[in-house]
Amino acid sequence: MIKTGDNRPIGVFDSGLGGLTAVATLMALLPGEDICYLGDTGRVPYGGRSRETIIEYVRQDIEFLLGQEIKAIVVACGTGSAVALDQLRDQYPVPIYGVLESAVEAAIQRTATGRIGIIGTEATIASGAYERLLGANGEFQLISRACPLFVPLVENGRIHPGDVVIETVVAEYLAPFAEGEVDTLILGCTHYPLLERVISRFLGPGVTLVSSGAAAAEFVAQTLAEQGLLAADRAAGSHRYFVTDRVAGFERLASLFLQQNVSGKVEKISLG
Ligand code: DGL
């Protein structure tokens, strides 16, 4: 039997807006849960930084959320998950979930040809973490590529089909993944699903896109339910957002992406 009764929020963080792709799925699956989101917008992007810096930033993100009395943490950041999580995961008193394993699981379920593409930040691709998870049995052909311009473009709202800047950059980065080369593409950075419409239009219907944030959120929702950690008797949870830079830009883009007004729920904080 599934027990319920932990009313503490779920903590979710990313370097910026990207983790909202996990939050959107959590809200849809678990509408009664409180969610506490941190976007380290003052220091985004993480993906071009050194391993030591990424580990330190992720540590500060986790410690901030622990101060909000959360019951679990979702590292809704491909870079943080690939580079820092192995080192940090066991050091804290709450479960900490990354985005890699569930994205890999989803890709394995969806591929028919075994030809899987992986895109992510420079740090994620350089870590080789996806290849390690997928390559263990040699069953898959993998093509991976870093797409460092995607995150700054997303953070600046350049996400719409028809925007010549994002369409040009997508065509340049994603040419190796054209239909026939892969049948499944892991969006290994949680910002990238915000580009889903532009990416699908370029790659066509023969390439299935896997959102690492959404896949992780599905896994976390199921795991919390199995462990009896869901909130009890709540129709609608409350949502709070913390950022490390200007509130206004985040409010605008987050409201657009989540299809709900987050004005008044976003607070600026300092880390480190
Ligand atoms: N959304 C992050 C990721 O999944 C952020 C990338 C970055 O800050 O460079 O990797």
Image (cartoon, rainbow, N blue to C red):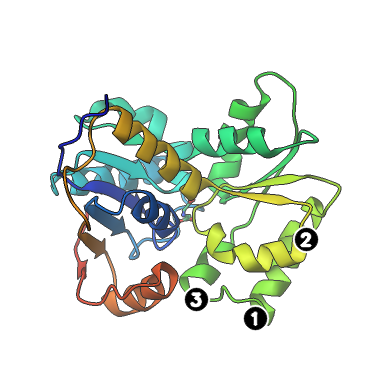
On the image, numbered disc 3 is attached to which residue?
157
Report x, y in % for residue 265: 21, 70
Measure the alpha-carbon separation of dots 3 and 1.
10 Å
Residue identifier under label 2: 204
Residue at point 46%, 50% (across, down): 49
Q: Secondary structure at mark 3?
A: loop
- Whether the residue under disc 1 has CB within 8 Å of ligand 1: no
| Residue type pointed to by label 3 | Gly
- Distance between mark 2 and mark 1 Cα atoms: 18 Å
Residue at the spot 72% in from the left edge and 59% down from the top edge: 173
Horizontally, residue 92 falls left or right of residue 177, namely: left
Residue 43 sits above or below residue 55 on the image: below
234 and 113: which is toward the camera: 234
Furthest residue toward right: 180
Percent x, y for residue 176? 80, 52
Which residue does the image show at 22% across and 34% down from the upper left? 229
Q: Position of residue 120 (x, y in %)?
A: 58, 49
> Which comes before the other along the chain, label 2 or label 3?
3
- The kind of residue tagged 1 is Asp
Does residue 111 appear anywhere in the picture? yes
Dot 1 falls on a residue whose secondary structure is loop
Quadrant location of residue 256?
A: bottom left
Badge 3, how many Cα within 10 Å: few under 14, some, many 20+?
some
Q: Relative to the observer, which residue lies in front, 167 or 152?
A: 167
Mark 2: amino acid: Gly
**Residue at the far front in the pictured view:** 1
Which mark sits nearer the N-terminus, 2 or 1?
Answer: 1
Check contact, mark 3 vs mark 1: CB within 8 A. no
**Residue under circle 1?**
163
Q: Is residue 39 above or below residue 156?
A: above
Q: CA distance from mark 2 to mark 3?
A: 23 Å
Mark 2 vs 3: CB contact within 8 A: no
